[in-house]
Image (tube, coloured by chain):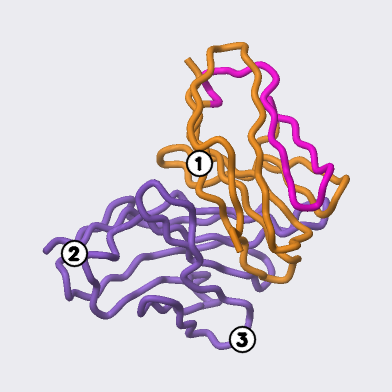
Chain colours: A orange, B purple
């Protein structure tokens, strides 16, 4: 099992450009999440999904969109990147609620200049 | 919304020493609590979790944590640390979202440095 994988690992964007981050999991998990990690801030929840075809907003959703067209994939989109979106993005997945472990991907380091 | 406070953004101890990383949470109901570890340039790995069973929870790599409801704390400790324990440690609480998923609310992290 590869677990949770993320593509790409690194990316540099100019302000105003768009991009999509891909998260894939091979554990048949229903729930998937996108977090961002900023220095001294811990991780913050951007969006999440409770199953194929569903998405919902987390703590810091502004400037991002997501899609879950297939159960194993969760895409995070930036339509018009801003320097404030420079961060490390982590995807996670889990079987369900009730204190189950979330499994994290290796992260995508995004820099917006 | 839940919140998590980790006291001490940086902790430095000698190899073989006891280490205690502090975590306090805010919750009106018994929570699910987690400690995750992040090694340099990697994702997060679960160390241990509390899900309302025993108050002393044992995890991987010799770590353990004690849930204290009256003090709303979930401190992490290891009796004898190793150089390889150098990493960032995050305390997190499960936060049920409006859409029905358990998002995690994280503390700001504690960078643990083990000195040889």
Q: What residue is disc 1 on?
A: A37
Looking at the picture, how far across and down is residue B13, in whole percent? 18, 64
Label 2 marks a residue whose chain is B
Name the mark nearer the viewer: 1 or 3: 1
**Residue farthest toward the right in the current orientation of the protein:** A53
**Residue farthest toward the front in the current orientation of the protein:** A1
For the residue labelled by badge 2, is the local secondary structure a helix, a strand or a loop?
Answer: strand
Label 1 marks a residue whose chain is A
Q: What residue is disc 2 on?
A: B13
Circles 3 and 2: CB atoms closer than 8 Å: no
**Residue at coordinates 47% horizontally, 15% vertically from top-left?**
A113
**Residue farthest toward the bottom in the current orientation of the protein:** B54
**Residue at coordinates 67% horizontally, 70% vertically from top-left?**
A99
- Front residue of B74/A58: it is A58
Q: What residue is disc 3 on?
A: B53
Which of the 4 image quarters holds residue B2?
bottom right
Counting other residues with Cα less than 10 Å from the Cα at mark 3, is it few (<14), some (14-19), or many (20 or more)? Answer: few
Q: Which residues are magenta?
A: A62-85
What's the distance in space between the residues labelled 2 and 1, CA to CA? 25 Å
Looking at the picture, how far across and down is residue B56, in whole percent? 48, 85
Looking at the picture, how far across and down is residue A65, in whole percent? 74, 31
Instruction: Note whether A65 is above or below B16 in the view shown.
Output: above
Q: Please report whichever mark, 3 or 2, sits nearer to the chain's N-terminal start.
A: 2
Tally the marks: 3
What's the distance in space between the residues labelled 3 and 2, CA to CA? 31 Å
């Amino acid at each position: 099992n590869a677990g949770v994988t993320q593509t790409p690992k690194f990316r540099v964007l100019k302000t105003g450009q768009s991009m999509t981050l891909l998260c894939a999991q091979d554990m048949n998990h229903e729930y998937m999440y996108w977090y961002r990690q900023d220095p001294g801030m811990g991780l913050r929840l951007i969006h999440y999904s409770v199953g194929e075809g569903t998405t919902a907003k987390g703590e810091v959703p502004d400037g991002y969109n997501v899609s879950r067209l297939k159960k194993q994939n969760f895409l995070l989109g930036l339509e018009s990147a801003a320097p404030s979106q420079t961060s490390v993005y982590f995807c996670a997945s889990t079987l369900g609620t009730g204190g189950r472990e979330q499994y994290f991907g290796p992260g995508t380091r995004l820099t917006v200049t | 919304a839940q919140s998590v406070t980790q006291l001490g953004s940086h902790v430095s101890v000698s190899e073989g020493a006891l280490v205690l990383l502090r975590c306090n949470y805010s919750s009106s109901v018994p929570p699910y609590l987690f400690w995750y570890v992040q090694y340099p340039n990697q994702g997060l790995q679960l160390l241990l979790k509390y899900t309302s069973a025993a108050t002393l929870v044992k995890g991987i790599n010799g770590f353990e944590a004690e849930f204290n409801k009256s003090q709303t704390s979930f401190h992490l400790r290891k009796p004898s640390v190793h150089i390889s324990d150098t990493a960032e440690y995050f305390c997190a609480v499960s936060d049920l979202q409006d859409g029905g998923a358990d998002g995690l609310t994280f503390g700001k992290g504690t960078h643990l440095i083990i000195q040889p």
